[in-house]
């Protein structure tokens, strides 16, 4: 266990690598109750979300989920967010652990984080295992949102996740969470902690707020321009238009390194001996069996370029590659 965003969170159960491979090969469950939930129920909620966050909410409809960003006036990412839009019009805005207050300040709503738990069920056999617990769990499609009653308890189930695998996330009243966790584990899902969650999202090339995204990093720098609907209004739009017109000063790339020694956050990226950038996330890839990293580098550093990463005084060779790694 370890402190994380004000919560005590499991780092691992049986071991990070075995949990990681269970998710890639079968199915794993993650306690992600530290994610916030700000619930919006008023009649203006959808328009407020649409005019505040970067993505175009009206590209989807009730019964769907969407990935989006909350920016500051300078175009930096205050948080990256998943929206769950219920069939009845209720919007659950799902920020990262420490950013719930900022999201609530921007959008209003009720913080219901402490009333529920969220369990992520992820992996290629997720449909079979979820359906063994509740037939309706196994029927929720990618980025769909539905309400389900399990064992007499109302749940919200969304086809979302953070591993690169197929999966669902289940929001359930906290008093029933342990029973659901046990049922999923008994059905064959492997409990997995924050360690595997981080290596899985890194292999999938998914950003982590505070590393690949922050108040000083824009969606365009992070390669997430697709989440910005420039034909809508949102906080930080003017700054992003200026950055789009001028070109980004840095961009996020994937780097595949030689050998098993993992790059780490803060390691320097070198090209021809010159320091050009910094690793934001790095680790050993359990699937690829070598090091991988994400890093910010100048725009002229591109796919197939050879680089070096300085790891505690030793330079390790690497190649800029397309993401996802896996």
Image (spheres, rainbow, N blue to C red):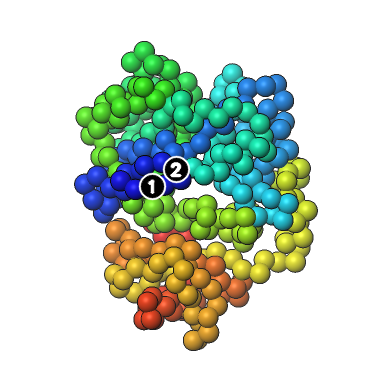
Tag 2 near tag 1, CB within 8 Å: yes
Q: Mark 1 points at which residue?
A: 3
Residue 304 percent location from the top left of the image: 48, 74
User: Compared with residue 293, is residue 40 higher up or lower down, i.e. above or below?
Assistant: above
Residue 67 shows in this picture: no
Q: Which residue is drawn at 34% across and 32% down?
A: 127
Q: Is residue 106 left or right of residue 29?
A: right
Quadrant (top left, top right, bottom left, bottom right) of the C terminus: bottom left
Q: Is mark 1 on a helix, strand or loop?
A: strand
**Any mark on residue 6, and which?**
2
Residue at 52 percent across and 27 percent down: it is 112
Near mark 1 (Cα within 10 A), the count class, few <14, some 14-19 or many ≥20, is few
Asked whether residue 267 appears in the rendered view, the answer is yes
Label 2 and label 1: CA atoms lie apart by 6 Å
Q: Would you call the spot at circle 2 few (<14 residues within 10 Å), some (14-19), or many (20 or more)?
A: few
User: Which residue is drawn at the image coordinates 38% and 72% (left, top)?
Assistant: 257
Between 49 and 33, the residue placed more toward the observer is 33
Asked if residue 15 lies left or right of residue 90, the reply is left
Of residues 127 and 204, the one nearer the viewer is 204
């Amino acid at each position: 266990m370890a402190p994380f965003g004000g919560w005590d969170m499991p780092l691992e159960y049986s071991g990070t690598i075995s949990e990681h491979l269970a998710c890639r090969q079968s199915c794993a469950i993650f306690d992600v109750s530290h994610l916030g939930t700000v619930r919006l129920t008023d009649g203006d909620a959808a328009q407020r979300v649409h005019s505040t966050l970067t993505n175009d909410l009206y590209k989807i409809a009730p019964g769907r989920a969407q990935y989006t960003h909350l920016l500051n006036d300078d175009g930096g990412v205050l948080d990256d967010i998943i929206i769950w839009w219920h069939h009845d019009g209720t919007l659950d805005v799902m920020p990262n652990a420490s950013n719930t207050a900022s999201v609530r300040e921007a959008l209003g709503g009720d913080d219901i984080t402490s009333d529920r738990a969220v369990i992520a069920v992820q992996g290629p056999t997720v449909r079979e295992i979820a359906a063994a617990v509740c037939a309706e769990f196994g029927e929720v499609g990618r980025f769909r949102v539905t309400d389900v009653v399990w064992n007499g308890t109302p749940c919200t189930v969304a086809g979302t996740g953070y591993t690169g695998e197929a999966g669902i996330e289940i929001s359930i009243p906290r008093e029933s969470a342990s029973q659901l966790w046990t049922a999923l584990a008994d059905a064959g899902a492997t409990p997995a902690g924050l360690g595997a969650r981080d290596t899985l999202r890194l292999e999938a090339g998914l950003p982590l707020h505070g590393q690949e995204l922050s108040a000083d990093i824009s969606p365009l720098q992070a390669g997430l321009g697709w989440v910005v609907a420039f034909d809508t209004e949102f906080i930080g739009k003017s700054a992003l238009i200026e950055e789009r017109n001028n070109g980004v000063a840095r961009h996020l790339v994937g780097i595949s390194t030689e050998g098993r020694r993992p790059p780490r956050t803060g390691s320097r990226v070198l090209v021809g001996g010159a320091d050009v950038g910094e690793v934001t996330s790095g680790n050993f890839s359990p699937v690829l069996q070598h090091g991988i990293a994400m890093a910010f580098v100048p725009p002229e550093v591109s796919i197939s370029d050879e680089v070096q990463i300085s790891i505690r005084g030793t330079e390790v060779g690497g190649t800029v590659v397309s993401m996802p790694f896996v």
